[in-house]
Amino acid sequence: MSKIPHDIINDILLQLPVKALLRFRCLSRPLCSIIDGPKFINHHLAHSLHTRSHLSLILRDWNIYTLDFDSLDAAAAASVVASAESLDHPLHVGGGTEIVGSCNGLVALRNSERDLALYNPSTRKLKRVPVSEIYPPDRFLKTGYVFYGFGYDSINEDYKLVRMVTFVGDDDRCETFDHDYEVKIYSLKRDSWKKIKGLPYYLRFLHKPFYQVLHRRGYGVFASNALHWALPHWPELGVKNSIIAFDIVAEMFHQVPQPDYHKDQLNFQVDVEVLDGTLCLMCNYEHVYVDLWVMREYGVKESWIKLFSFRATKSISSFMFLRPLAYSKDGDKMLLEVNDQKLVWYDLNRKTVRTVKIRGGPKSFGAEMYVGSLVPLGNGNEEEEKKQALEMEKRKTNTQKMNDFLSVGFKLKL
């Protein structure tokens, strides 16, 4: 190794997935030093994002599953069946863990408002988020719907988790727009929460009963140092569709200009997503067709470009919800999530659709892209890591005991 130029070694390592890099750390101290260095970690992440390599897809149901993106990319060109695998993690308590956001290979996990964590699925490192109690502003109020968002503050090199809490009356007669939300932001670098004050009035209309629950719209999408949510249409209150953003650097809310929609007679619903790091918008016209817009220059209204209009096909006769997830490696196709039930490849040139066949995955899901990375979670905590390892080992042992018990039971019956 000492005879191989450092630049060549570095270039080779940049091509490798995290799993291989973690194994190679054991080969020598110089190699371990390179792989663990912050400069290499950043370069490896940047290379993976630029080349669309080491990507995976998370399917969120009662349990969490992962799909290798390369297998999905192969399915775009041929009738290949992609295999989903269950994602085991230290926060697992029998199912029900939600992924509220993904950024640079880290995912934010939630079991409840008191049980949150940041997790790197590639390195299997977990950082529990300290508990921040929720205090209703009035004793006659209780916690209502809770929004989340997770992103990276590139200016301060910090990962931040945002939580917005709505409040309702004990008798449920109090609407969420009667009171300000409680907005707090967690900083990984500081390992603490901070309350955000001076909230804009329009924020009160962000929550609409059943709107966020149906398609996990309560989880903000991250683009250009800001988290974004679609504010739903309230015709009875004169509130129109809009895009609300929270700048995680300035820690302030603002509204994002929208494109000039079609002036037809159909009603429409707006949703937001991030595609290849860029904010995009889906305009659903009464489930008849969906326009997909991309904002080329963040914050500039004139930079909105309509990529395509997606209409009903033989395999998709109607759609309640559509979300873009990623471009294929050749850039000619786009992976779409449709109705929380299927993944399809949309050919941008031919305007054709191919359904992705998935083996072992859930029937209904929400999808989230993530990239394999070496991004660390702070300085680490050896005691916490030992505890996580023991919990994982205990679950595996209990599972094996149950399998052995069932095996003996079947033998006795036979």
Image (cartoon, rainbow, N blue to C red):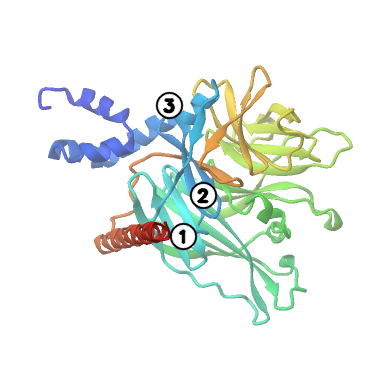
Position of residue 364 in the picture relative to residue 162 (left or right)? right
Q: Nearer the viewer, residue 292 or 260?
A: 292
Q: Residue at x 31, y 29 (%)?
A: 14
Alpha-carbon neighbours of circle 2 within 10 Å: few (<14), some, or many (≥20)?
Answer: many
In the rendering, at what x and y percent does residue 217 appear? 64, 51
Residue occupied by mark 2: 101
Residue occupied by mark 1: 186
Q: Residue at x 71, y 54 (%)?
A: 211
Residue occupied by mark 3: 51
Give the amino acid at mark 2. Gly
Q: Earlier in the sequence, mark 2 or mark 3?
A: 3
* Tag 3 secondary structure: helix
Q: Give the foreground label among 2 and 1.
A: 2
Q: CA distance from mark 2 to mark 1?
A: 14 Å
Q: Earlier in the sequence, mark 1 or mark 3?
A: 3
Q: Residue at x 54, y 21 (%)?
A: 78
Is residue 190 in view? no
Q: Residue at x 47, y 30 (%)?
A: 71
